[in-house]
Image (cartoon, rainbow, N blue to C red):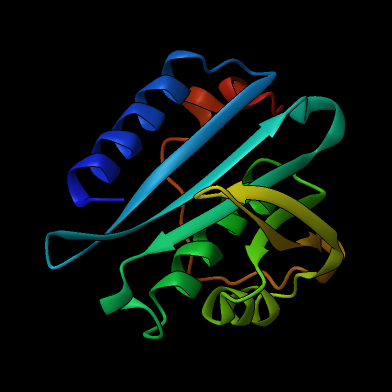
Amino acid sequence: MPPAERARWVSQGHWSGLGSWSPDDWGLGLVVFREGLPIGKVWMGASQFAVLREVRSSSWFGLAYQGQGYGTEARTALLHLAFAELGAEAALSEVFQDNHASQAVSRKLGYRPDGISRDALHGEAVVSDRLRLMRADWRQRTDVQVDGLEACRSFFGAK
């Protein structure tokens, strides 16, 4: 996908998600910056979070920034928000089987295999590994801080 088309697709997805946000179905996209430049994005979303206590997560980083720990740090912060702040019981993710960097980050953070999924990508079928991290397997860190959540906690279907 050409850069301009990808930029439009990312922007449309971002604004569409914010416009349709409800406590029963939400998605939070956060951009990761290094020296003032965007280098990647993490996303977390849920449907019926108040009942299921599960979030879905994903991340994307530019090739030049992969393998340097940025993805691990960003996903660690996202998991802290999910488990420590919102009270999630599980975090789910899907990773293309040939995306070794993302697979490594997921394993490092404690995700375990949870089956496969099939999707269409550029007109071809691709297989992804489904992964699940349970609260009991999550390793909380003390160097993550969340500010301002109380004002919008109800937007997430969390108490």
Q: Is residue 156 above or below residue 111?
A: above
Left or right of residue 137, residue 101 in this image: left
Residue 108 in percent (x, y) is at 65, 82
**For residue 31, above or below residue 66:** above
Residue 133's quadrant in the figure? bottom right
Q: Position of residue 32 (x, y in %)?
A: 31, 58
* Residue 134 x %, y %: 83, 60
Q: Residue 39 at x, y = what percent?
A: 26, 63
Q: Which corner quadrant of the image does residue 64 belong to?
A: bottom left
Q: Identify the residue at image location x=75%, y=70%.
A: 111
Query: Residue at the spot x=64%, y=18% of the render?
Result: 23
Q: Determine the image quadrant of residue 107.
A: bottom right
Residue at image point 59% right, 26% down: 26
Between 53 and 93, which is closer to the camera in this rendering?
93
Q: For the view shown, which residue lies furthest in the front direction?
A: 123
**Vertical relation: 136 (above or below) 1:** below
| Outermost residue toward the left in this view | 36
Q: Quadrant of the C terminus?
A: top right
Label count reads 0
Residue at left 46%, top 57%? Answer: 145
Q: Classify residue 45 as left or right of residue 152.
A: right
